[in-house]
Image: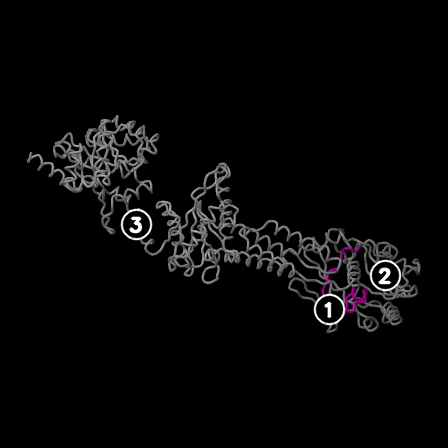
Amino acid sequence: MATVRGWFGNLNGGRRSHALSAVQRRRRRVALVAVLIGALAGLIELPLPLEDAYRTARAELRARNAPDDIVVIAIDDATMDELGWQPPTRSHDAVLLTRLFEKGTSRVLFDRAYASPAQPDEDRAFVEALRRFKGRVWLGAMPKTDNGLNQHDGLMPTPALRSEALLASMMGQAAPFGLAVRFPTSSKIDGQDIPSISAVLASYSGEEIWYRPDWAFEVKTIPTLSYADVIFDRVPASALSGKKVVVAPTHLNSPDLHRLPMGDQMPGVYFHVLGAHTLKDGAPLELSWYPALLFALAIIIAQTRKAHPSRRLTWTAVAILSLAPLALDRLGVYFEIFPAMIAMGIAARGLKRVALGKYEDATSLLKLEATAGDGTAPQSDVYALRLLTLPNRKQGDAAHGAAQFMEKVARLVAQADPSLSIDTEFAVEGDTLVWCAPALSRSEIGEHGEGLLAIVRHTLGKDRQGTKLGAVLGVDVNHEMDLRRRISHAMLACEQCSYLRNDLCISDEAHVSEIERHQKLLADLESAIEDEKIELGYQPKIDLPSGRIVGAEALLRWHHPELGPIAAQEAVKLAEDHDLIDELTLYVVDRAMSDLGDILGSHPEFRVSINFCSRTLTRGDITEDVALILSKHDVPARNIIIEITESVLLDFESTRRTIADLVALGAQVSIDDFGTGYSNLEYIRQLPSAELKIDRRFVSSVGSSEDGDELVRGTIELAHSMSKSVVAEGVEKKETADRLRALGCDMAQGYYFSQAIPAKALAKLLKDARMAA
């Protein structure tokens, strides 16, 4: 077996093929757009509500009791009742501080700014208490804010209070739909860095960050005491000893009520406490959406390398992104996943559309139109491998089965070259596989072509029904031509293999010229028939005993305006290959009847022979068409002879009825080129033919060899025994004509008598012969 090496490989000295790069460029555009949309969604926080809702849901899975080291002193409804629904005075606050520190509280924070002065005696009482416990009490403050949507002038305790107390920022931000809250660990107020309430409660001393409280702490487990119970000394010291305390309004009329995510309304002070417990566990590490999007980018890049995006890979990535936060939340590490989800979703949909448009039936094979770009591949040959027989499949899955089988062939071909890049892709159209490979010399192409075909035939063997699977190979080597035309030429080379019964055909410059000529002829043939641009020549048939002209064979004469004279055989083959043979045949019948009308009128026994191919004879209605033409020109059917080749006998059952109908119409049948085809004496006996035409190859040997004479003599005697006349074709010498006459041959035609001539010349020839007689 010939070796197969260097078959594939990338175009242009290692670069990917034109087809691949076009598809890859589209995939990369899809990937880029998907990632950019994901990044944009993250930048504008488009999926933030979803992110917050999912974070809250995860927190529910980690729900736990809040530590008891921070106590809320609630100015609740009970306190308001006892105080006559008047807010506590600063004298009350002074009493509160005394009671708290007497019972061992470590620090006290007021979630209130005290920005306005009160009655002088009230302020004095509170200032005195603050001075007594200086360094252990914090009053609330707010920085100025202006974010375009909300404006706040800021809040600060009065100077008298501020001089005796520390400050704690009450700053916080609510997310859309109230699904999340963010706190800073400190705020810039009047040029000073003021720690937040949660930072003070947590004794946080780290870097300044914004963070979200951990909703896993159950709010209802945060220790809470009524303001009234404390000031009226109804709380035991054990409830406050060593605790940090935050004082805030919680009654129903308080403006500081907010909704818990997925829950009821809750006083703002509890958010600060949740934040404090969060900070005590360590400052949360907020990674935003970047890590997840980078992960999504890696998945998308992996998907762009696949012919079809993997649903398993996509859903695996979704599962990882969904489950990873569950583990990392416990470590205080948070990241946003939905921008990445958006990117992967867009990429999966876009890549699927690319695959459906570019690949054949859920395989890794490109559709041929996906490869037909306008670029060139100057350092590559284009290969087309055509399977002559595809495995039989059930009708329901025939197309899918064929595509799957061709993918198997592509894998087999790829394995023939271990150095083949994993990025090399194959294209398919029906039974033909197309790909590009590094350019080889003509001899190397032949060697490798034999090797590849041997591998394919040996490996594939036969299908399940035992049908042998054949293959042919076409290779285009026109390196400067655009890829679209090269693919077409490689596939046409495959077809040429089928016609010529070759295994391998190479499409070079000469082949391309022939293809272009062929395409030009095909494009003009139909119009030439319609516009009656095809002429007929008539070669006389001579009765050998008498020397009279008794008929003629109609032969095509097509002079193409650009390509010049076209051989009759070429025109007929072109018509047969492209389903124009019926039109051409009927045109010849019509034109012959028109040309020879006068001759047939004056020579009623004159017969014109017209060639019919087996494909035309399988048409059941061809007899009707012939009858209409004869009727149109008022010509009896007895004046036409239908010439058929022996190849018709291969399809005898399909043509028998048509031939019988033509004979019944009155036409005669002649078996042309007798001795060169598929003769079967029984078929010939059954066929209602009136004459046999001996092929010129046998006629040429008459008179020059005894074997040739005996062969022709035997044919003549066989024909006469079946009451058939004998016509000898290709008679070019007088000696040949004389010997045929002596052997008993009935008629002859050939250059010795006359070449094919126009109808007018034939009429003159008949007239001259008659006058001479």
Q: Which residue is mark 1?
A: 208
What range is drawn magenta here? Answer: 194-217
- Residue type pointed to by label 2: Asp
- Residue type pointed to by label 3: Lys
- Residue type pointed to by label 1: Glu
Q: Which residue is mark 3?
A: 520
State the separation of the CA atoms marked 1 and 3: 80 Å
Mark 1 vs 3: CB contact within 8 A: no
Position of 725 with respect to 198 (left or right) is left
Callout 2 environment at 10 Å: few (<14), some (14 to 19), or many (20+)?
some
The image quarter in which residue 47 lies: bottom right
Position of 195 with respect to 485 (left or right) is right
Dot 2 lies on which element? loop
Q: Which mark is residue 69?
A: 2
751 or 489, which is in the foreground? 751
Of all residues, the one furthest to the front in this rendering is 706
